[in-house]
Amino acid sequence: MVYVVIIFLWTAILLYLLLGGADFGAGIIELFTSRANRHRTRKNMYEAIGPVWEANHMWLIIVIVILFVGFPKIYTTVSIYLHIPLVCMLLGIIARGTAFVFRNYDAVKDDMQKVYTRIFILSSVLTPFFLGIIAASVVSSRIDLQAGDFFSAYILSWLNFFTVAVGIFTVTICAYLAAVFIIGQADDEADRKRFTRKATYLIFVVMGAGALVFIAAWIENIPLLYWIFSDVPGIIAIILATISLIIMFYFLNRNKPVMLRILAGFQVSMILFAATYSHFPDIVLLKGGQNLSLLENQGEAKTMEALGYALLIGSVFILPALGYLIYSFQKKTDEIADH
Amino acid sequence: MSTAHYLWIKKKEAVYLDVTKAWSKGVAIFFATGAVSGTVLSFELGLLWPRFMEHAGPIFGMPFSLEGTAFFIEAIALGFYLYGWNRFHPWFHWLTGVVVGITGLLSGILVVAANSWMNSPSGFDFVNGQYLNIDPMKAMFNAAWFSQALHMCVAAFVSTGFAVAGVHALMILKGKNVNFHSKAFRIAAIFATVAACLQPLSGDISAKDVAKRQPAKLAAMEAHFHTEKGAPLIVGGIPDTATQTVNYALKIPKLLSFMATNDFNAEVKGLDSFPKIDHPPILVTHFAFQIMVGLGMAMLGLALLYFIALFKKKSWSESRWLLKLFVIATPLGYLALEAGWTVTEVGRQPWIIYGVMRTADAVTPMPGIAYSFYLFTAVYISLAVIVSFLLFRQIKMVNTLYDSSTDHKTR
């Protein structure tokens, strides 16, 4: 049963990265869009994201619930030692959610909208940045359970070149996902061209940020290259991601939005797979070599069983409904007389 | 919202459609802020109470995982509902709205079940500081879940009902969009008043339950210092912990014994039966309890007046004084609700898991945690301000957005 739970955990992280990531990316792209085009970009974005938006947080909540029910030791260790970046990320989530609500539900449309937009964009960058920092700190062996003073226990646990580089990398991935996603939402040829250009350009940005991650890992003595290339599945994942990137370039100018989305999603899944596979079942790497393993720190058998069944039963209800929701709103909005 | 929607589909009066849409905006605002604060909450359990979660997580996680499911379904249904006008069959669309309501209620029940486990821990054996033989199902259906969940669900209807009814009553008094607001007021008021009549009954179930499981909490609620037979019910008053007496209170003989046990002469344990170190803060618990009950009674009274107006004295329902009373009652439900949570949470102290773990042992070891606390308090206050601001702007715009009697666009 523990493997069922772990698969759910991994899938929820992936879906949050993909769907939530595209959502954050929407805000990031707004930041890098010329004023003249901002309005059009936004309109296209929210036709696509609006209906699904309410569901995006749920993936993150599922991750957290799985952790505290099934793997409480891991959950508590992370939340004690990464308190500060977690709080920063939460502030980002709150600011962003609230700004989004305002943009959509404020009945009075006035200058306040500009304030909401500014908050929205800023928090769209900060939230994935801290998410990246948290993800990187978990594997960078800097969490020190024996740390004596505040600084080394609660600051050094998450602040170094590597974590910051991963933070930046996460931000670029989100922007990239959103750019690919939005291509399919374009109403006319000019928009489509504009979005395609943006996506192409972002591929290079992501690669640059990726290189930065490797350099930072080298500076911080984190054996990132070894992790990824030491076992066959990791190598295969990286090769597949590279191949799909080449296919991506082929499809970019051929008006195949769905294909592009699948490819981009595939690339990100492969990156996550390569990044997590080599540690498995360890999920948190601590200073001094002892690590927290998912298998060794699982809850009692009865708890894991109940959790596994709850997840299975939940997905029977949730997945078809969510699928139908996304399907229903994929049909172009303008075909239906707006109310 | 679904009631108004139902009336629109059945009666085809445009005003019901307007009410539905206006309310759906409110639901959306609350849901979105709720989703955000819920996300934060699931993190904060660990950020603030890691020692508690380390042991409690695997035991009482079941309702949380199910609550996640219910919340997820609610989010999906709300996506259908908000963006689904004129896209789906009317009854399917209506049904998604109903699903929003049901799953919302279900989430509430499940979260309260998790909380009630803290009051009535079960589903494990606590041996020498270790938590053994965990049974999550038993933990979920602990002894307190039913009484607490029932009380909270009814409270949700009371507080929302009175808040919504009060706002619409105010607008009727101001003479704005009277048709729209009257229809809305009627639906909200009926929900509020029916729930207000049911609440004392569920309160009675809760009282008996607390008397059995957490006698120290009951004693603190009532500021009942001395164990005695045929204990009086203490209404109001200022408890003095030094002399162990309650000053200026109205004492109704033998009623407390009856309320706690159904027997006028039964013994009710007072605070003197418990070691000082296990006493909850008496002042706060007592006052919060008095506030909750007092407000509950006030709303019950208003509910009865409203029923008389509906069935006996039709002239009353037109009258301004009844509407004014509803305006006054706008915040009462929420005040009572918060007071009630204060009773159950403060009344459980010094325990975080009743009889098993003390709150002081559960808190995070990180120094400077007070700053986190201030920060999140500020965040929640600003969320509340923001939501009120948005709702206020929605109400202000009723005139142009929703009232079909002022403009005659075909809808």
Image (cartoon, coloured by chain):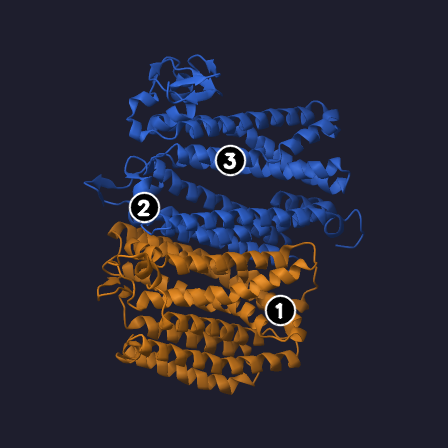
Q: Which chain has been coloured orange in this picture?
A: A
Q: Quadrant of residue A215?
A: bottom left
Q: Secondary structure at mark 3?
A: helix
Kind of residue sitting beneath label 3: Leu
* Circle nearer the viewer, 2 or 1: 2
Q: Is the residue B12 above or below the residue B266 in the image?
A: below
Q: Quadrant of residue A110?
A: bottom right
Q: Residue under mark 2: which chain is it in?
A: B
Q: Residue under mark 1: which chain is it in?
A: A
3D distance between C-alphas at marks 2 and 3:
25 Å
> Crowdedness of circle 2 by 10 Å Cα count: few (<14), some, many (20+)?
many
Q: Earlier in the sequence, mark 2 or mark 3?
A: 2
3D distance between C-alphas at marks 1 and 3:
40 Å
Q: Quadrant of the C terminus of chain B?
A: bottom right
Residue A262 location, x and y as percent?
47, 76
Pointer 1 residue: A42
Q: Quadrant of residue B4?
A: top right
> Can residue B314 be seen by looking at this rendering?
yes
